[in-house]
Amino acid sequence: DITLIKNHLSNAYVATITIYDITAKKEMEVAYEGQQAITSALAFGVNSYWIIDWETEEFIDAFTRNDYVEKKINPQVVNKKYTEAMRYTYYALLGKTDDNMAEYEIDNVRSRLSDQGRYIVSEEIYFAPTNMYFQIEYAALNYKDRMAIIMSTRDVTTVRESERALQLELKTALEQAKRANLAKTNFLFNMSHDIRTPMNAILGFNEIATQHIDDKERVLDALEKAKYAGKHMLGVINDILDMSRIDSGKLELDINIIDVKEHIMRFEDMFKFDMEKRGIKFEVIDETKTKYIYGDYLRITQVITNLLGNAMKFTKAGGTVTYHGIEVEVEEEGYVGYNIHIKDTGIGMSEEFQRRVFTAFEREQTSTVSGIQGTGLGLAIVKRLVELMDGKITFTSKVGVGTEFVVSFKAQVVDEANLEMTLAKHESEEDSNFDIKGKRILLVDDNELNREIAYEILSSAGFEVEQADDGNTAIEKIFDADEDYFDLVFMDIQMPSMNGYEAARQIRKLSNRKKAHIPIIAMTANAFEEDREKSFKSGMNEHIAKPVDIEKVIEIVKKVYSTLE
Ligand code: ATP
Ligand code: MG
């Protein structure tokens, strides 16, 4: 007759406990009924109510929504005393070992009710296969002319679980926000440092050049150094741009045909001289067979040059750097796999640092300590790029012994028929011998200094250059000129009164067909992918990011003309 006690906490237990005092023969049946009791209890989010005499602790009544409980259990409940029943339930039936029973002791319940009128205890019960949560609520009431306590049980498992899930979600979101914020702060801090350092050098050497303006050698030396610092700064900015592009999913691979052997030869050429200068032995082992594959030439180059650059930087004279490219078979028809091992006998990395090696701005030693230049963005970008190519990058490293990075990726093999077509197209493109000489550019930029620099670069490359200092002037100039007068427009984006996007849109609306179709190339410091897209949307043909590199300009001008023909 302990049966009834279990009933306090859940209908589920009502059933299970009944088994105790029924003959073996009936056990199965009851267990079955018990299961049903559980199911319906859960279905209704069941409550049971027990009414206890305030003074004598006797059960006066018991109600439940469940027939089984009501008919078989309740009659027994009313004959028991509350504390006795609860203790047994708590320790013997529920197997609880904690101190929570104190919460249910009649004295405690009475005193809580005297204070608050209402008292709630939450209980977690392991009920295979999961935990269930119950809320036991006490209230004082007058019942059948007696002072009584009503105790109700409620299954709050689902509520608890969704609350928990919500809490977990909130917690994760909060942690993510915190982490992102920290990362942002660190990022800004590092970025500001890594841009400030070369900036400092540029200004410093500029100052030196000014002070020694008559000493030609010193001026040249200072300018050379300022240029080097400027290039380094541009490298850092480009790295940061790359990271942000990849992270925002804006970087897309530019898949083209790659001549594998030629590609590898380029690496060799690129590093041979520097390695030799540093007294490092540079080995290139090429075990590839396939001649042409599809891939992003630029990005694969970026990955490998970063890894080779690191291997070189962190290896002392007398050491060896090895590039070992292995072609492997893969399951997919028409694809090959590559495992590229880049190994050095350099300084290696500590185990502690190895965990952070792919994190942006992380370096084992600062430049000040090691004298080795860098920002710590290289490997962060490499990892992202490799993943963008659906590849994998792993490494092993040991302090004082060396490091080996392995990049694995798959590439589609170029089939011969396709190849001939593409190569033919390529040749015809290169044949279209485009002549810069005499091409007249309208250079639109509000910043005089920028115009001056661009003017110098473009005119010394052979272009005729005219200038306009904002969008309105540009449109007027084109409007007033003969339709053949300008060949190209180079358009800055951020300008007062009318920006470059708007100016381009206006030009495209001119009634003269020829003028309306003049090639417009954005030449701007807005270097994000969104900016490129905006340029194209406003009708421009191309987008060049400042600082302007003349070779790039010529390449793009050629590209624009080749698409016009
Ligand atoms: P960046 O590549 O941005 O110019 P970096 O070379 O310092 O700067 P990562 O390429 O990201 O940055 O490398 C991060 C750090 O990992 C390095 O500073 C260095 O401590 C360690 N590291 C990377 N490659 C090697 C290597 N081959 N041997 C030893 N340490 C390495
Ligand atoms: Mg690096």
Image (cartoon, rainbow, N blue to C red):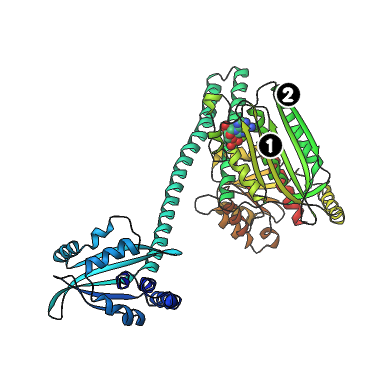
- Left or right for 496, reference 396: left
Residue 474 x/y as whole percent? 59, 52
Quick one: label 2, few (<14), some, or many (20+) residues within 10 Å?
A: few
Name the N-terminal-most of marks 2 and 1: 2
Q: Quadrant of the C terminus?
A: bottom right
Residue 230 visible in the current orientation: no
Q: Is the distance from the Cβ of mark 2 to the nearest ligand 1 atom less than 8 Å?
A: no
**Label disc, if present, on residue 468 of the rendered structure:** none
**Kind of element beneath mark 2:** helix
- Above or below — where is 16 with respect to 409? below
Residue drawn at (66%, 32%), measured in percent from left and top? 309
Identify the amino acid type marked 2: Glu
Q: Ligand 2: which quarter? A: top right
Q: Quadrant of residue 49?
A: bottom left
Residue at which label 1 appears: 305
Residue drawn at (32%, 56%), measured in percent from left and top? 97
- Above or below — where is 81 with respect to 165? below
Residue 522 x/y as whole percent? 62, 50
Q: Quadrant of residue 153?
A: bottom left
- Above or below — where is 402 with respect to 155? above
Residue 279 visible in the current orientation: yes
**Kind of element beneath mark 1:** helix
Residue at which label 2 appears: 276
Residue 465 x/y as whole percent? 66, 43
- Left or right for 29, reference 148: right
Q: Quadrant of the N terminus?
A: bottom left
Near-viewer residue (169 or 369)? 169
Identify the amino acid type marked 1: Thr
C-beta proximity under 8 Å, tags 2 and 1: no
Q: CA distance from mark 2 to mark 1?
A: 16 Å
Residue 45 x/y as whole percent? 36, 74
Residue drawn at (69%, 22%), measured in percent from left and top? 278
